[in-house]
């Protein structure tokens, strides 16, 4: 439970129970702390009740409501960070994060995943059953299907990454690193990671980055133009959400290029509207429909072609979660896995 910025506590709360007949209850076997959890960790105003945290999980289904058809007790499932009915117009179009009956596991009126158990609405539409054991060695990589891998992939898809492209990834957190994996997977030839933490950029190189740019602002823009033949890159994956990151993203996109933004925006307007217009740069993005991407990304994990689980560099039990937040906020850890 997060009570205020910097104040995370482990508390006993009532067990989640089936509320709607379409719900399932998961016993969480793996969860994690997200880069986006660091925003409330920095800014949350004190609350009376505390906010349940965590939106990424793998777990065993313990109970299902009367109307759940395809998910059953005992299934090991991935829980995407958004719930969705799987049947509405948007779910059928693959945009599950716009589900008309959906929502996010944000702790405001929902159960949350940094816990022993979580209530999942719309179990059939939301959960994805795995065919591996709960302690499979691939578990860290499979856990990234609940958010960061699908989110990095979404940035690459929205940016229009295709074989032979030059790509820049703005942000060296777990989503940015998964963006590197996604860009490589989609055939990008040049992948530039922007970041200044050597442990992160070093891992990015192992995951497929071809160049590292540690500069920021104007210097970064110049460096990326140099590296990409003078015109900027075809695709930019904006994985931060700050105004400066967005400004850099628009500035380094080449004419006709695309910016896929998946960092939750902490700015009111998109900067550089004029250059964006005159360069015909496409800007898009939003919450990734990770549920839609599991089908496509899972086989690559099972075959070992991609190893997104390498973004986890620390594992804690529930008692270690408060320190996990601290470690990620201090940039001491890239991403923390939780084994409740
Ligand atoms: Zn839907």
Image (cartoon, rainbow, N blue to C red):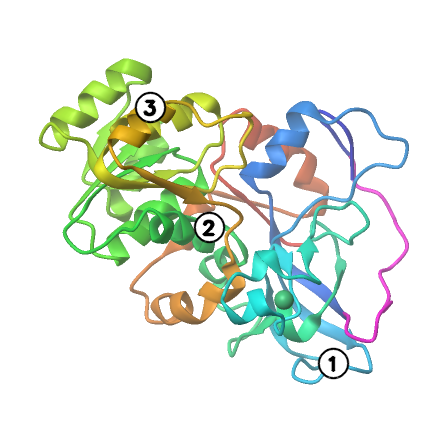
**Residue at image location 47% in from the left, 42% down from the top:** 262
Which mark is nearer the camera, 2 or 3? 3
* SS for dot 3: helix
Please give the range of residues in magenta.
9-23
Can residue 113 be spotted in the picture? yes
Residue under pointer 2: 151
Ligand 1 within 8 A of label 2's CB?
no
Seen in the picture, residue 186 relative to 254 is either above or below; the reply is below
Q: Residues within 10 Å of mark 2 (few under 14, many from 20)?
A: many
Seen in the picture, residue 7 relative to 315 is either above or below; the reply is above
Seen in the picture, residue 45 relative to 96 is either above or below; the reply is above
Q: CA distance from mark 2 to mark 1?
A: 27 Å
Q: Earlier in the sequence, mark 1 or mark 3?
A: 1
Residue under pointer 1: 68
Left or right, residue 125 beside residue 169: right
Q: Position of residue 221 (x, y in %)?
A: 25, 21
* Outermost residue to the left: 229
**Residue at image location 85% in from the left, 30% down from the top:** 47
Q: CA distance from mark 2 to mark 3?
A: 28 Å
Q: Hey, which quadrant is residue 293 in on the image?
A: bottom left
Q: Name the foreground residue: 124 vs 172.
A: 124
Seen in the picture, residue 236 relative to 78 is either above or below; the reply is above
Ligand 1 within 8 A of label 1's CB?
no
Q: Position of residue 12 (x, y in %)?
A: 87, 48
Q: Position of residue 319 (x, y in %)?
A: 72, 42
> Which quadrant: the C terminus?
bottom right
Q: Earlier in the sequence, mark 2 or mark 1?
A: 1
Q: Residues within 10 Å of mark 1 (few under 14, many from 20)?
A: some
Q: Position of residue 72 (x, y in %)?
A: 70, 82
**Residue at image location 86% in from the left, 65% down from the top:** 17
Residue under pointer 3: 274
């Amino acid at each position: 439970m997060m009570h205020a910025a910097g104040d995370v506590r482990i508390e006993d709360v009532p067990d989640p129970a089936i509320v709607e007949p379409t719900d399932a209850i998961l016993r969480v076997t793996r969860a994690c702390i997200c880069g986006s959890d660091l925003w409330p960790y920095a800014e949350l105003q004190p609350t009376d009740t505390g906010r349940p945290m965590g939106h990424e999980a793998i777990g065993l289904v313990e109970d299902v409501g009367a109307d759940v058809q395809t998910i059953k007790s005992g299934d090991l499932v991935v829980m995407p960070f958004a719930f969705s009915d799987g049947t509405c117009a948007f779910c059928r179009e693959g945009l599950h994060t716009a589900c008309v009956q959906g929502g996010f596991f944000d702790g405001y009126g929902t159960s949350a995943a940094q816990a022993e158990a979580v209530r999942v609405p719309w179990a059939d539409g939301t959960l994805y059953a795995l065919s591996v054991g709960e302690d499979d060695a691939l578990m860290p990589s499979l856990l990234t299907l609940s958010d960061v891998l699908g989110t990095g992939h979404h940035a690459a898809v929205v940016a229009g990454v295709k074989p032979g492209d030059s790509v820049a990834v703005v942000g060296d957190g777990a989503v940015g690193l998964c963006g590197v994996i996604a860009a490589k997977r989609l055939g990008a030839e040049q992948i530039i990671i922007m970041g200044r933490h050597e442990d992160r950029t070093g891992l990015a190189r192992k995951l497929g980055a071809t160049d590292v740019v540690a500069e920021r602002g104007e210097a970064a823009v110049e460096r990326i133009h140099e590296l990409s033949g003078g015109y900027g890159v075809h695709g930019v994956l904006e994985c931060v959400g700050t105004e400066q990151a967005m400004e850099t993203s628009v500035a380094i996109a080449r004419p006709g290029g695309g910016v896929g933004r998946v960092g939750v925006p902490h700015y009111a307007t998109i900067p550089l509207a004029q250059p964006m217009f005159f360069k015909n740069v496409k800007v898009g993005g939003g919450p990734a429909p990770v549920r839609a991407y599991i089908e496509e990304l899972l086989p690559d994990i099972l075959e070992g072609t991609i190893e997104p689980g390498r973004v986890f560099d620390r594992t804690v039990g529930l008692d270690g979660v408060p320190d996990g937040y601290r470690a990620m906020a201090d940039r001491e850890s890239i991403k923390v896995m939780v084994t409740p």
